[in-house]
Structures are given as C-alpha cells and as structure tokens.
Amino acid sequence: MHISVIPSYRVMLHLARRASGLDYAEALDSMENGMRDYVRSQLAQMHSSLVELGVRSVIGQLGDPEPEQLMKALIELDDSKPQEVTRQALEVASRSLPRPDLSARMFIFPGDGESAVLVNQLGGVLAFSLGASATLLFVWPRGDWESNLRYNVVHEYAHLVRNLLFPRGIAGGRLVYMKTQQPETLLDAMVAEGISDCFAQECLNGARPRWMDTQDEVEPRRMWPRLQRRFGISDPTEIRRFLFGDGDRVPAWTGYTLGYMIVRRFLDNNPGTTMMRLVSMPASDVYDGSGIETNGLD
C-alpha cells in the first residue's frame, strides 16, 4: 500500500493570506479561483467528470468564509497535525486489510465551518473517494473532529480497496463497472457503504459513524420496501437521494442505515467471514447471504 497524505488546507491557508487585503467578494473569488486551479492540477490524470466533481466539492465545502477567520481555523487545524491522525488511521486500516497494490492520495481540505451538517451532524469531518486513487477529506476543527477524522479515513480506505477490486468508469452519465459493463446500482452503493462502516467499526473497536446517532428504529423499517423495489436503479442522482435523504420523502441517511443492516446481517449469518473476503464480494452476494430477502429486517 502506498497512500500519500496531502495537507491541501495549507494551500487554502496560503490563498487566504494572499486574499486578506481584498474586499470580501474579491477575496472569496480569489480563493475559489486558486482552489479550482489547484484541484484540477492535482486530479488532472482522472476522468474529467471526476475532476469537476472534485472541484465542485472543494468549492462547495469552502463556503463563504471571512479570510481572517479561515486563517485562524486553518492554523488551529495545522497545529493539531491532521495528517498524522490520517497516517495513523491508515496504518490501522492497512493492517486489517493489506493491499500492497493500492496506490492513492488522501487530500485534507478545509470544510465549511458554517455548515450545520458538517459541524453538528458529522462532527467536523466528511469524506468521499474518487475511484481507487483519491480520497477528499473535509475537516473543520470543532468538537471531537480527530476521532471523526480517524473513522472517516478507515471507512474510505475500505472504499479505495473495493474500488480497486471493482473498477468503475463513467458512461452515459452513470458509473459503470469496467469488468462487467453493468451500471452501479442503489444496492451496490448501499452495500459498499455498509461494508466500509462495518470495516471501520472492526478496526476502531466498535466506533460508530455520526449518522447512526440520527436514526430511530421505525424509519428504516418503514423505508425498507421503498428502497428494496428500487435496488436496481442506476441514476446517480437517485442513488444519492436514497443514500443521503432528500429532506422530504426520504429521511436522512436511509441508504446508509439499510446498507449497514444488510452487511451486519450477512456477517451475523456467516461468522468467520474475513474483511478481505467481504470487501471482494459482489453486492448481490452479500444481500443474498444476509437472509433479509427471506426473513425481512426482523
């Protein structure tokens, strides 16, 4: 395994210092333009759609900060050495799931300190991976962010490994598995998230993802038949809606919750399954082995 940890927030700190003498709107434009150029240069070898997804995510997470406040937060973040937290978490993850053929980069970007979702719901950290070669980590130094960073790093490591084993490309606006030419489905995405959460829990002594604190026992069971009948959808917008919720008909984190339940049930029914085996299984096999199709969620 070779994963580089890149403190990209230092680039943002440099841009904020450079923009501090400008008026507010000009400062934001200057910082955003600088980050766009930086992200595009760092992800230049990836598919253009993934590059632009990375750019949109970084700019979206930047928000609308005052340069002085942003500099203060990023200096605080740097003093806490998030790259060391990340490296230590990667060591834990790679011992449990060694992949000497994995080569990737983890970028640590500043998150939006005014985002209630990031700061309150997610404990200052969110992350996602672009294929098997890059993970974007967004961090805002509030509360127990170090523990949440550790969890997210281990969670995303499992995604990187699974993405390496099941490489995907983009075709017709959808993610398509390169080996089978089949599109990624809602079930695929749910099971992938469930595997990553179960892996992180195993590595970190039962640590819980922050989204679990927002769930009750009623909503997942109410939503189960609604997602089950849509397991085969491949529209990325719809997949995201059912994974994360839409603030309307789909409660927050529904797909994550049910994906975790599928994988946890599989592990309960198949004791002795290693994480190496689990991460290499197609989602349909995990679902079939969970017994939920026959026995339901109860």
Image: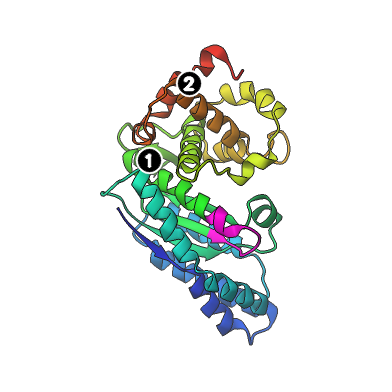
The colour scheme is rainbow
Of all residues shown, which one is farthest toward the top? Answer: 294
Q: Which residue is mark 1?
A: 162
Classify the position of the C terminus by image quarter.
top right
The location of residue 293, given as percent across then percent down, is 52, 16
Q: Amino acid at mark 2?
A: Ser
Indicate yes or no whether the magenta region holds residue 140: yes
Image position of 228 (left or right of 6): right
Element carrying mark 2: helix
In which image quadrant can residue 238 be found? top right
Along the line of sight, which residue is nearer the eye, 291 or 87?
Answer: 87
Compared with residue 57, is residue 186 higher up or lower down, i.e. above or below? above
Of the numbered discs 2 and 1, the one sitting upstream in the chain is 1
The number of numbered badges drawn on the structure is 2
In which image quadrant can residue 83 be found? bottom left
Q: Which residue is mark 2?
A: 290
| Residue lying at 55% horizontally and 36% vertically, measured from the top left | 239
Indicate yes or no whether the magenta region holds residue 292: no
Q: Which residues are magenta?
A: 138-149
- Label 2 crowding class (10 Å Cα cut-off): few <14, some 14-19, many 20+? many
